[in-house]
Image: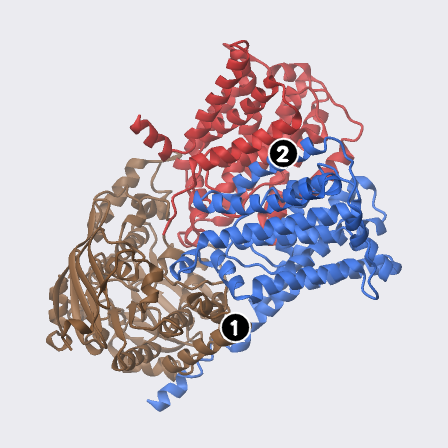
Chain colours: A brown, B red, C blue
């Protein structure tokens, strides 16, 4: 297995700079046939850049890319595809205005002729059936009509479809981030089957449990370099975290006792989901961290948006008596202003506060941005740089800074830690707790059980309604999963 | 030289000033320097009218893809008639007439926004439909009217201070104010944010509805003001007075460096682009070419300028 | 495990029917608008609903439909063509002069026009230009060329063109037949062929299309060339109907064609267009523009306003239906 001849991919001394930033610094990487290699590291560690080089979408400044034993001189996405390298990137690469079958056709130029539509539909449907039994996606569904989880499923399935070009290596960059745990499990099980059949996978995930359970080999990256590579069995959670350079998770359970007793502080939000039949309302008091749980797309985001809307125009089902800010989960679509600097992106929620007379003061804007850059550790030399110069995780931090820097007393979070590295997460968790202690209320939709444990109170959603209402003490993973899948009577 | 080149490429709207200068030079070479100053003054006077509507159009276009105010020509036509009727040739009624023109434009802006908002019609179609209706009102209202502006008002639009048209000076001041408003007020920032990402703007707590309303209202009012000024400058209102400002208002905005994709506006470029277009026509007139050639050259030059300046860098 | 997966097999939160019905309604809305206008006409003047009536009422709908389809190709690629009206006018002038007097020169010119459109597509892609500005400039160019070629209205359409535009097929009026053919051809080309999917995809997510190995330059060129081709056809048919040329004959077509695409359910961005919808939208506009108003005995001053009002009413009805759809 370790013979060089079985290498699908070999990268030698690959380097890449973006302006002054050295994204990759002499990286070596090999992937063997029938191997699942996991790549872990902080946001900005260079994982995505490395994968883009492998996919042909970014050219390396220096170094060799060897695929199947041949060095690639004029490497491109088309060449990569021809050589059997497929990618599932974080940003979806589907055309929303096309159907599932048409998107498959885009990927396979060979699907032509009069019945191309049927051929493409059969190809993608059979693969979806294979990976995600019971997926509920039709070949003639438009991508724009599908919820994000199903789009991700189509994206993954499409990467594994084969026509004239073989599938040798599939790069999965955070493929489970928009999937609920059940579908994520289906995907991981399929990945293991594919690997057993001789396909190689590069798997990128911030969920260390997934990484440890499903990979053959793990490569850890930091600051544009690979700093550790070993068999998966050689790692455990702690070793991974320390190698990545993250701090150990502090035991948050310990300070659970000093939390406020529920209901002692003033009420801030009372909301009832649309599909709610019974009498269960979501309530949030000042200084509380409220978690929203359940499978992806079961009404959590809708409720957050309803609370957000109710803050400006009253509505019967939601009562909010304080100012509200929202941290978006889908930062490209809902968060970032791509033409603006980091400072302008942070300041947008606080424009009124930043005024001096009628005009916005640049100085105050910079002060606010610098304060939050230091507080939340946004990694940038200059807050006047464009927001897109930040890595994904740091962009997310800027969005946190935007909400926390505003005067809002209630912060809504729409699964904002999607695809964020462990180190960033821990920093943000601490910040949230600190802000809550200062009297801010957080309503937090998350797909990760670990994050629910940070909440004072958790509501579990199913089919657009609250099915369980768990206090911090009663929260267990089993209870959440049980309620999400089967549902219990709301108490 | 290299630095200058880089600066020029970094700020593509400078091309419009460069173009204006080149065209002007070409024209005075042709006339052997005769009337060089007069040509510039005349161009300034005419550019004012394009810049005024251009500012409104710029704010609208900055709101994002699909936002454009096609009702400006009809607006200008109707407002000029309203202003002249209210003034009724009497110098004492000038202020009321101007207010009436502004009010007329404001009403049109509000109607535009209501069509866009309440009926969810894309702005390009909503303002187009509105312009049809306004046109009819104007035809019906202005039939047989050939109203002259009050002499004082007509003179006012032609006053020069130190050889520079007063209107141009006032408009320049207004342009600077618009530039500051765009970058440094809550309203301006909101417009820019909506243009970049309307969903994100809404979720950042920006009152998208109000900002869009204000923007269409502003564009309408500037159209109304422009109508009154045009009627004063050309000494009379008529239905077709605003016709050329449909394409001209869009052209100066975009040649001036404002992104049609929204979220990025350039106020200084408006003047460069307006001067460029006006001087281009002046130059062709000095050359004594036919109408066909004039159109042809104007078109070629617009395409050439935008091709030379290049579009925005692709975001990947 | 089996029990768990069977539970997950019916997530039930997004019922299947729900994903289908908005598409169906979106597709049906343009047809409903057309039916509305037809009903109004029938109510005002029953005799108009006849073979002869349709031939008369819809005659000018053919060039509008062709221009709308041309605009639709441009909109598919997230662009907008502000020059299509002037272009149709120029083609009309060529048709009424060169195509009759020196057919070879005329044909070469018209082919050259399609080539110019293709080149514009290439230029816009290559320099990443805003199509609005480029076509704004081209609007002046086509207008200038038309004025140079035909300073005063005149010329005459070639006889074969006149003959072909006055064909009287059995049972179905010619304009209806022509609209059906235009709709069928463009629907098949853009929606059913395998390359059509790539063209629409280039409007939906250009990066994805590029990464899959397709040439975005080629896609843009093909879209613009198609627009040029249909623009030429529009000019030809227009002159075939009006018999003589005029440099300003197509001026209204730019805005009509955009309105037609939107009325037909298209959107300005995202490659979301519907060829059948666009043709229906063009027919609706053509009917609403003059026959309906004639039957309503409207004073000429208010005809333009009525055009605008009809556009508003039809689109408002559409918005109402789709809003109800969303609320369901």
Vertical relation: C178 (above or below) C6: above
The image quarter containing residue A175 is bottom left
Q: Secondary structure at mark 2?
A: helix
Image: A457 above or below B36: below
Count neighbours of disc 1 (C-alpha within 10 A) and say few if under 14, some if 14 to 19, many if 20 or more: many
Q: Which mark is residue A426?
A: none
- Relative horizontal placement of residue A342, taking residue B75 as reference (left or right): left
Q: Pick whichever, A425 or A261, lies toward us.
A: A425
As displayed, is residue C222 above or below residue A39? above
Q: Are marks 1 and 2 in contact (CB under 8 Å)?
A: no
- Asked whether residue A138 appears in the rendered view, the answer is no
Chain where mark 1 sits: A
Q: Is residue B71 left or right of residue A468?
A: right
Q: Residue at x 12, y 74 (%)?
A: A235
Q: Quadrant of the C terminus of chain C?
A: bottom right
Q: Chain of mark 2?
A: B
> Residue A28 location, x and y as percent?
15, 61
10 Å crowding of disc 2: few (<14), some (14-19), many (20+): many
Q: Which residue is mark 2?
A: B103
Q: Position of residue B294 (x, y in %)?
A: 61, 27
Q: Position of residue B145 (x, y in %)?
A: 78, 26
Q: Which residue is found at the position 70% from the left and 46% from the top?
A: C235
Do discs 1 and 2 share a chain? no
Image position of B103 (left or right of B302)? right
Q: Residue furthest right?
A: C47
Element class at badge 1 = helix
Residue A445's quadrant in the figure?
bottom left
The residue lying toward the viewer, choosing from B41 and A462, is B41
If the image is split into quadrants, where does the N terminus of chain C sit?
bottom left
Residue A381: tell me if it is visible.
Answer: yes
Which of discs 1 and 2 lies nearer the camera? The answer is 1
Q: Which residue is mark 1?
A: A117
């Amino acid at each position: 297995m370790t013979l060089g001849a079985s290498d699908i991919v070999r990268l030698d001394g690959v380097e890449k700079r973006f302006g002054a930033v050295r994204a990759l610094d002499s990286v070596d990487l090999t992937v063997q046939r029938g191997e699942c290699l996991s790549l872990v590291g902080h946001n900005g560690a260079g994982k995505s850049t490395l994968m883009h080089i492998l996919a042909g979408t970014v050219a390396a400044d220096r170094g060799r890319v060897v695929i199947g034993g041949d060095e690639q001189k004029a490497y491109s996405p088309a060449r990569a595809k021809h050589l059997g390298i497929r990618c599932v990137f974080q940003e979806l690469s589907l055309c929303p205005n096309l159907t599932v079958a048409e998107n498959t056709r885009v990927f396979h130029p060979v699907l032509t002729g009069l019945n191309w539509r049927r051929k493409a539909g059969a190809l993608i449907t059979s693969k979806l059936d294979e990976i995600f039994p019971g997926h509920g996606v039709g070949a003639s569904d438009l991508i724009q009509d599908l919820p994000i989880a199903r789009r991700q499923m189509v994206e993954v399935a499409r990467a594994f479809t084969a026509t004239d070009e073989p599938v040798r290596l599939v790069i999965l960059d955070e493929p489970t981030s928009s999937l609920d745990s059940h579908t994520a499990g289906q995907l991981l099980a399929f990945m293991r089957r594919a690997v057993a059949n001789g396909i190689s996978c590069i798997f990128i995930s911030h969920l260390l449990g997934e990484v440890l359970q499903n990979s053959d080999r793990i490569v850890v990256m930091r600051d544009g370099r690979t700093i550790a590579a070993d068999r998966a069995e050689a790692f455990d959670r702690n070793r991974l975290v320390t190698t990545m350079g993250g701090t150990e998770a502090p035991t948050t359970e310990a300070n659970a006792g000093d939390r406020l007793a529920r209901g002692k502080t003033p009420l801030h939000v009372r909301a009832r989901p649309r599909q709610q039949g019974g009498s269960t309302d979501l309530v949030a008091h000042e200084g509380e961290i409220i978690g929203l749980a359940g499978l992806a797309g079961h009404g959590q985001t809708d409720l957050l948006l309803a609370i957000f809307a109710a803050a400006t125009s009253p509505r019967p089902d939601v009562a909010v008596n304080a100012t509200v800010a929202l941290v978006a989960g889908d930062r490209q679509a809902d968060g970032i202003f791509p033409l603006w600097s980091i400072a302008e992106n942070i300041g947008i929620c606080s424009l009124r506060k930043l005024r001096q007379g009628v005009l916005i003061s640049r100085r105050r804007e910079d002060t606010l941005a610098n304060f939050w850059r230091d507080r939340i550790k946004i990694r940038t030399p200059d807050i006047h740089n464009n927001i897109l110069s930040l890595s994904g995780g740091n962009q997310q931090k800027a969005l946190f800074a935007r909400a926390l820097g505003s005067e809002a007393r209630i912060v809504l979070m729409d699964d904002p830690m999607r695809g964020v590295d462990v180190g960033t997460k821990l920093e943000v968790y601490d910040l949230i707790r600190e802000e809550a202690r200062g009297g801010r209320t957080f309503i937090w939709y998350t797909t990760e059980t670990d994050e629910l444990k940070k909440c004072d109170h958790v509501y579990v959603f199913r089919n657009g309604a609250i099915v369980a209402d768990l206090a911090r003490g009663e929260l267990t993973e089993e209870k959440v999963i049980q309620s999400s899948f089967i549902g219990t009577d709301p108490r | 030289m290299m630095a200058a080149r880089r600066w020029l490429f970094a700020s593509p709207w400078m091309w419009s000033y460069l173009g204006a200068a080149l065209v002007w030079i070409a024209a005075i070479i042709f006339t052997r320097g005769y009337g060089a100053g007069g040509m510039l003054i005349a161009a300034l006077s005419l550019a004012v009218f394009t810049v005024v509507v251009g500012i409104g159009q710029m704010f609208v276009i900055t709101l994002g893809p699909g936002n454009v105010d096609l009702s400006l020509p009809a607006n200008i036509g109707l407002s000029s008639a309203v202003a002249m009727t209210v003034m009724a040739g009497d110098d004492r009624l000038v202020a009321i007439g101007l207010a009436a023109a502004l009010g007329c434009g404001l009403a049109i802006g509000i109607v535009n926004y209501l069509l866009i908002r309440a009926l969810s019609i894309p702005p390009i179609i909503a303002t187009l439909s509105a312009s049809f209706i306004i046109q009819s009102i104007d035809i019906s209202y202005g039939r047989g009217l050939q109203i002259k502006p009050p002499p004082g008002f007509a003179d006012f639009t032609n006053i020069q201070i130190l050889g520079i048209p007063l209107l141009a000076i006032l408009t320049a001041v207004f342009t600077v104010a618009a530039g500051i408003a765009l970058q440094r007020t809550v309203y301006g920032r909101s417009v820019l944010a909506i243009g970049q990402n309307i969903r994100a703007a809404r979720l950042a707590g920006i009152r998208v509805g109000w900002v869009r309303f204000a923007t269409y209202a502003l564009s309408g009012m500037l159209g109304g003001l422009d109508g009154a000024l045009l009627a004063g400058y050309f000494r009379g209102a008529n239905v077709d007075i605003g016709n050329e400002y449909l394409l001209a208002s869009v052209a100066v905005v975009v040649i001036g460096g404002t992104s049609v994709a929204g979220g990025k506006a350039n106020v200084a470029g408006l003047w460069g682009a307006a001067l460029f277009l006006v001087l281009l026509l002046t130059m062709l007139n000095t050359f004594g070419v036919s109408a066909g050639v004039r159109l042809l050259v104007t078109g070629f030059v617009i395409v050439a300028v935008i091709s030379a300046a290049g579009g925005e860098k692709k975001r990947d | 495990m089996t029990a768990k997966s069977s539970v997950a097999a019916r997530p039930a939160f997004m019922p299947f029917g729900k994903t289908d019905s908005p598409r169906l309604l979106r597709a049906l809305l343009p047809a409903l608008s057309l039916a509305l206008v037809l009903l109004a006409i029938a109510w005002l003047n029953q005799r108009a609903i006849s073979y002869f009536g349709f031939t008369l009422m819809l005659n000018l709908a053919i060039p509008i439909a062709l221009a709308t389809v041309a605009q639709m190709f441009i909109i598919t690629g997230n662009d907008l063509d502000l020059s299509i009206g002037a272009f149709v006018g120029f083609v009309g002038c060529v048709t009424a002069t060169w195509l009759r007097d020196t057919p070879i020169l005329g044909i070469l010119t018209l082919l050259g026009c399609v080539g110019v459109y293709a080149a514009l597509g290439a230029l816009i892609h290559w320099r990443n230009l805003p199509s609005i500005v480029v076509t704004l400039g081209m609007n002046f160019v086509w207008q200038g060329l038309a004025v140079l070629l035909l300073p005063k209205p005149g010329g005459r359409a070639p006889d074969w063109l006149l003959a072909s535009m006055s064909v009287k097929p059995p049972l179905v009026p010619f304009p209806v037949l022509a609209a059906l053919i235009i709709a069928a051809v463009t629907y098949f080309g853009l929606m059913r062929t395998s390359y059509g999917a790539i063209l629409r995809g280039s409007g939906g997510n250009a990066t994805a299309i590029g990464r899959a190995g397709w040439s975005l330059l080629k896609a843009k060129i093909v879209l613009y060339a198609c627009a040029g081709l249909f623009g030429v056809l529009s000019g030809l048919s227009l002159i075939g109907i009006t018999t003589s040329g005029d440099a300003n004959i197509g001026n209204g077509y730019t805005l009509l064609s955009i309105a037609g695409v939107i009325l037909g359910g298209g959107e300005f961005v995202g490659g979301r267009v519907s060829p059948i919808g666009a043709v229906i939208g063009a027919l609706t506009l053509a009917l609403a523009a003059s026959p309906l108003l004639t039957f309503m005995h409207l004073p000429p001053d208010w005809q333009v306003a009525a055009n605008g009002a009809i556009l508003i009413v039809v689109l408002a009805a559409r918005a109402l239906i789709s809003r109800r759809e969303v609320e369901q």
